[in-house]
Image (cartoon, grey):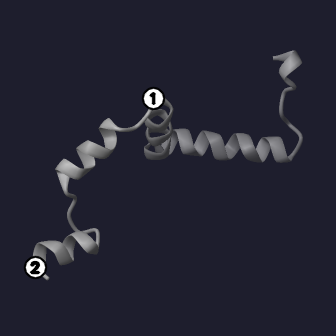
């Protein structure tokens, strides 16, 4: 196995053409999910909101 294939298998490099192909095939919903997963501030907000919900601090939808 070549060094490039070994590095790719270990996650050391990204095959950009393959990545571009994957991204093109994503639905708008999947792209939005990917954006949220890559946004550390959004993830922190979601975690905080889930904790508030667990503590019963959420706002019912009918009062929103």
**Above or below: residue 26 compared with residue 4:** above
Residue where numbered disc 2 is placed: 2
Counting from the top left corner in percent of width and height, residue 48 is at 68, 44
Q: Name which residue lies at 18% across and 51% down.
A: 16
Residue neighbourhood size for the residue with mark 2, other residues' Cα within 10 Å, grouped as few (<14), some (14–19), many (≥20):
few
Q: Name which residue lies at 32% across and 40% down.
A: 23
Counting from the top left corner in percent of width and height, residue 12 is at 23, 69
The residue nearer to you, when weighing 45 against 31, is: 31
Image quadrant occupied by the C terminus: top right
**Above or below: residue 19 compared with residue 29:** below
- Image position of 35 (left or right of 6): right
Q: Quadrant of residue 10?
A: bottom left
Q: Which label sits on residue 28?
A: 1
Counting from the top left corner in percent of width and height, residue 49 is at 71, 40
The residue nearer to you, when weighing 31 against 50, is: 31
The residue nearer to you, when weighing 7 against 45, is: 7
- Image position of 51 (left or right of 8): right
């Amino acid at each position: 196995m070549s060094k490039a294939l070994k590095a790719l298998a270990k996650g050391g490099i990204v095959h950009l053409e393959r990545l571009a192909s994957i991204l093109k095939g994503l639905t708008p919903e999947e792209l939005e999910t990917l954006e949220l997963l890559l946004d550390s501030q959004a993830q922190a907000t979601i975690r905080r909101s889930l904790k508030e919900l667990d503590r019963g601090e959420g706002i019912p939808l009918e009062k929103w």
